[in-house]
Image (tube, rainbow, N blue to C red):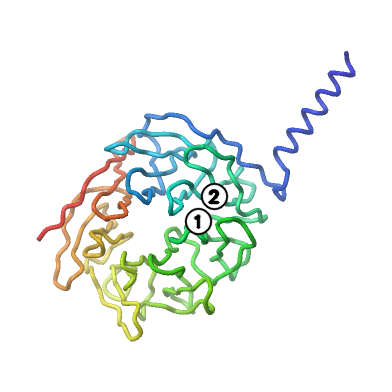
Amino acid sequence: MRLRVALFLSLASAMIGLLLFVGCEGSVLDLGDSSGPTGDFVGLPPRWIGWSPKGDSIVYEQAGQLIVGSGADLNVGNVITGKGRYAHPYWSPDGRFIVYDYTPDRYHQANLWVRAVDGSAVPRRLTDARTYDFMPVWSRDGRWIAFHSRRSPSNNVWVVPADGGTPKALGSALANEGSLDWSPTSPTLAFEAFVGTSSDIWAAEMDGPEAKRFAGTAASDKRPRWRPDGRSIGFLSLASKGWNVWQQGTADGSEPTPITTVGDVVAFEWVFDGEAVAFLTADGGLHVQRVQEGSEPTRVATCVDFATSPDGRRYVRVEFRNPDYKRYADTFSLEP
């Protein structure tokens, strides 16, 4: 009897070790629950909100787990991971999968994982380096996933085939949130890169030449965002009286031009198919402004974060209501 107990304990220990370390270069596997209901949308702030390609649901991180919100007001929640250090979820173009980074604990590396939204498949690890791979962004054609990495101090932007493979470095880019964006019309990635003492907007084609400076002003520029038609790119620039939204056409010889003039923009998105931009200012004001010269911004809400739907007509905002953060879904209106 004692022999059987000892054998059982030995096998159990071996299985636990296998689950924790097999094929991970020392990192723990993502063993979180596949799904479960939730109705709690207050407390810690929902972060890294992303709309599904069809615009009928969102995914976000809250309290260390990933949640999909659906329904008319996006308030029907379904937890798709266990509790842990899950972050930066991003939808696949077909809306079936989520790529995200997962950190087993604060003392280990973060790697990229792909998980079926409906829980129909075991989560698949995409990278396994002994470092931090984080903030993944899926290309519009579904072939590539770009991400930030600390694999090398001089190469922070990397890409990996979405089906798995060997990652490759693209360039020396800032590893700050929101700096990667794929073109809607080609497999071209725009990102920030330091040149000297300022940041510029660079771009790289997956099957083309090396990354090169793509757009920007003579001042520091950051957070590139392709216009929905792919004919221009928007970005934040310090070229005039603080951070403002600028744009520049993709055709050779195009010059950058300002869209906003308020001077304290912290984030922005294209809305109404590129006819306008929605932007958040440092004082928590969410504004909408047409692109044409001479337009004035309209303040539509107060929030600490926001995310716009694919068609740019709906948005989700996160608002602090002491002592909690609450999430609201609403619709933009564009003044004539």
Question: Counting other residues with Cα less than 10 Å from the Cα at mark 1, is it few (<14), some (14-19), or many (20 or more)?
Answer: many
Question: Is 230 situated left or right of 263 in this image?
Answer: right
In the rendered image, the vertical position of residue 92 relative to residue 166, given as above or below: above
Image coords of residue 319 (percent x, y): 29, 43
Image coords of residue 203 (percent x, y): 45, 73
Residue at image point 33% right, 86% down: 253
Pointer 1: what residue? Answer: 136
Q: Quadrant of residue 257?
A: bottom left
User: Which label's residue is closer to the chain start, 2 or 1?
Assistant: 2
**Quadrant position of the C terminus in the picture:** bottom left
Question: Counting other residues with Cα less than 10 Å from the Cα at mark 2, is it few (<14), some (14-19), or many (20 or more)?
Answer: many
Farthest residue, direction bottom: 253
SS at badge 2: strand
Marks 2 and 1 sit apart, C-alpha to C-alpha, by 7 Å
Pointer 2: what residue? Answer: 101
Amino acid carrying mark 1 in the image? Pro
